[in-house]
Structure formats: structure tokens, C-alpha cells
Amino acid sequence: MNFYPDLIAVHCAELVLKGRNRAGFTDRLVQQIGARLTSIGLHWPIRHRGARLLIEIGAERDRLAQALQALGEIPGIAAYFPAQSCGWDLAGEDEDSLANGPVRTLLLDLARTLHRPGARFAVRVERHTHERAISARRLEHEWGRAILEETPWPGVNLSDPDCVFHVALHPEGVLVYARRHTGLGGLPVGSSGRVLALLSGGIDSPVAVFLMARRGCTVNCLHFSANYLDRDRADTTPVGRLAAQLSRYTQRLDLTVVPYTAFDLALTGPPDGYELVLFRRFMVRVAEQLARTQRATALVTGDSLSQVASQTLENLTTLNAVATRPIFRPLIGFNKQEIIDFGRKIGTYDISIEPYKDCCALIARRPKTRSQPDRLTALEAKRLPDYPDLIDTVLGESIRLRFVAGRSAGAP
Ligand code: ATP
Ligand code: MG
């Protein structure tokens, strides 16, 4: 007989900390898992069991790998594993009947299914029940011996096994499984409020978006483009594809693309090295206005301290001065290589390094690394005299695209 998982157990992350809000968090997670599975055509029922969810694997068991991949992209999940359940009421059970009952048969099936020549195994029993008469240690021993005697597995290795057979004893039933997948952790999207992220086509800002989504924020993005994008083809540009990839983690993501031609045209006077900081302040001002209409509480950027000229402590402070909302910079203390490694893991790095023109044209050969807010305000009054009008113009020229669970979903 073969071992066939009939459900996926999902352990929620951090929900233990949430006291009375816990039910809301779990409901949100259930809803997001349900929506995500539905988006790939799987209508598998989900049951609540405290800090655990149980997803019943339906008739489409050949799609299990796809379902597992989707679960690996949903914030709020600590761990998940396909398991076979054994509806065994543990109340009043003792070790002998448990050791020789149906769990043993399941475990032997699992061991036969996963047998690899030369590999060593361990049996781990987790006790989530208070039945006094059951000792996890003894069951591990009994079942380990049964596997050695009745299957081709040659030996046990408790400290560094090639394969672990898990048995989780819950009051309402027993789960048998082998592979435990680590989830993203964090909190379900939507449980920490809404933010607007400035998304460039670069390496850093996509990672910043991911980190905010993993902490439970609903994230929408704003991109400044050197060109007017064709609405029908915007989702095939690098920034459109970055947004699509990020929507695997944010679940849903609205991307507003603003062409900044009007800024270039409005900027008067000869170059003085402040253009980049002026442009960054312009981005923040436009973002503020958009955040107001989208009811986003904070802005997010991919700044990392002193990575480039516009990210010195002085320049970042100068940017904060034009925002009324907090600007979150989750990468502020990251090294570039750490950001690259992260980008690779979340599947954005390869898109980020494709050639793409965003605001490079504005970078003076010697951009100023120091700037005071007052000086810049005076400079803005001189070089960009009609600021409110400029912001209305660029937002009027913007397009908005929606992405859901990794795919373009057209205009919102
Ligand atoms: P990234 O890799 O995220 O582009 P970077 O190292 O190129 O970052 P900058 O170009 O100074 O650094 O950008 C700093 C931050 O400003 C970015 O992380 C992003 O949040 C925002 N930003 C820069 N360019 C754009 C743009 N064209 N549209 C929207 N936001 C942008
Ligand atoms: Mg950039």
C-alpha cells in the first residue's frame, strides 16, 4: 500500500502573540489561503484547529506540489506539511494499543514509500495531548523498531537523519508526515494596515515591498517612469513583471505608473548637482498625494544607508521633511549582498537586473550628498515654481494596473 497524504496541516506564525485578535488573524489567513488555492483552480476545504489549519486535499492530488508552492508564498504561515490523518480518538488510549494500531500501519507505508538505499531515518513523536498513559519516547522506539524490521530501511540516525518520520498526536486525531516545509512566517497581509511603496526597476525596492507584506501590510506600489507606458503592454515591462512577482506575496498589488516627463519639463535653471535630491523630493510629494487618495498610512522605499549619493543620512532626512506620513525603509541596515540574496530568494533579482531606464538620466556627475531642507525648499520655489500643478499633471497622466497572486489582473 502507498502512503497518500489526505490533508495539508498549516501552522500559523506569531498568532500566539495576538491575544483576542487571534481569531481575526486566523480568519484572514484562511480567507487568503482559500483565495490563493481557488486562483489555481483548487477548491479544497479548510478547517480551523486552534493555531493550526487543516486543508483537505481534494481529488486533484496530482496538483499537491502547486498547492505547496502557493502556501510557501503566503505571509503568516510558519510551517506546512502534507500529512495522512488517522481519525483516532486518543482519550483513554494507552501506548500498547497506539503502538500496534493503525498509526503503525500508516508509518510503515510512509517508510516504504520514501525508502532510499543507504539512507538512515528517525521517528519523532510530537504530543499535543495530555493523555498520561502515552510516552512519546516509547512510541518512537517501538515504531522505529517496526520500520527496521518490516521495511528495507537499514538503520536509524537520531542526530542527523536523512529522513524524519513525524507522528503528531492531537486529541482529535493523529497526523503522520515526513516533510515539513518552512513558511514565510510574519503576519497575514492586511493585518498591519496599508502602505504605498516606491517601486523602482532596481534590486532594492522589490525586497522592501516583500518585507512589508511579510509583516502583514497591504502594499500598493508607485513607479516613476521615464516613458509613457502603453496600458496594454505595461505588465510586460520589467516593473510590471516585478509587480506581478511581488503580488505572489502581497496577494493583491495595485501599481500606479507615473511618467515624470512633466518634472523634467518644469525644472528650470542650469544643473547644480541638486537635481537628484529634488527629484527624490518630487517622488515623495507625489507619493504623499497618492497615499492620501489610497488611504495608505505610510510610504516605503528601498533605501539602504549610504548605498548611493541620494541615500546619505542628510539626504534621507531632507526627504522626510516633505512627507507628513512616516517613510519606512526596511533595508536601511542591510548590506547590498544581503539584499541581492533576498531578491534571488523571492524571485525578483533576475527581473531587477534586466536593463531598464528609470531615473538614471537625472543623476548629475557629482550629485550632492549633503542637503538641508530649508535650502531645498528655497531651491524648489525657484526651480519648480508651480509645484501643486506639477503634481496634478503627473498624477493625471498616470495609469493603474492590478496584479493578483502572480498574474496581471488588468486595470482595477
Ligand atoms: P533600487 O534598487 O530600489 O532602485 P537604488 O539603489 O537604485 O534602489 P535609488 O535609485 O537611490 O537607489 O532609489 C532609492 C529608492 O527610491 C528606491 O529603493 C525606491 O524606493 C525609490 N525609487 C527610485 N527610483 C524610483 C522610481 N523610478 N520609481 C519609484 N521609486 C523609485
Ligand atoms: Mg533605482
Image (cartoon, grey):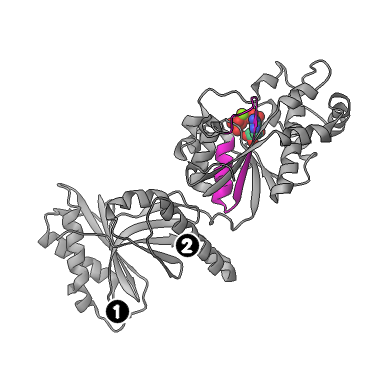
**What span is colored magenta in the figure?**
205-231
Between 297 and 312, the one lying in front of the other is 297
Residue at (64, 27) in percent of width and height: 228
Residue on which disc 1 sits: 89
In the image, taking residue 61 as reference, residue 2 lies left or right, namely left
Where is 307 relative to 139, above or below? Answer: above
Quarter of the image that includes the N terminus: bottom left
- The location of residue 107, given as percent across then percent down, is 21, 63
Residue at (84, 27) in percent of width and height: 384
In the image, taking residue 403 as reference, residue 110 lies left or right, namely left
- The location of residue 154, given as percent across then percent down, is 13, 53
Mark carried by residue 30 = 2
Residue found at the very far bottom of the displayed protein: 92
Check disc 1: other Cα within 10 Å, few if <14, some if 14-19, many if 20+: few
Residue 307 visible? The answer is: no
* Callout 1: CB less than 8 Å from ligand 1: no
Where is 108 relative to 273, above or below? Answer: below
Residue at (65, 22) in percent of width and height: 360
Amino acid type at mark 1: Asp
371 drawn magenta: no
- The location of residue 73, given as percent across then percent down, is 45, 48
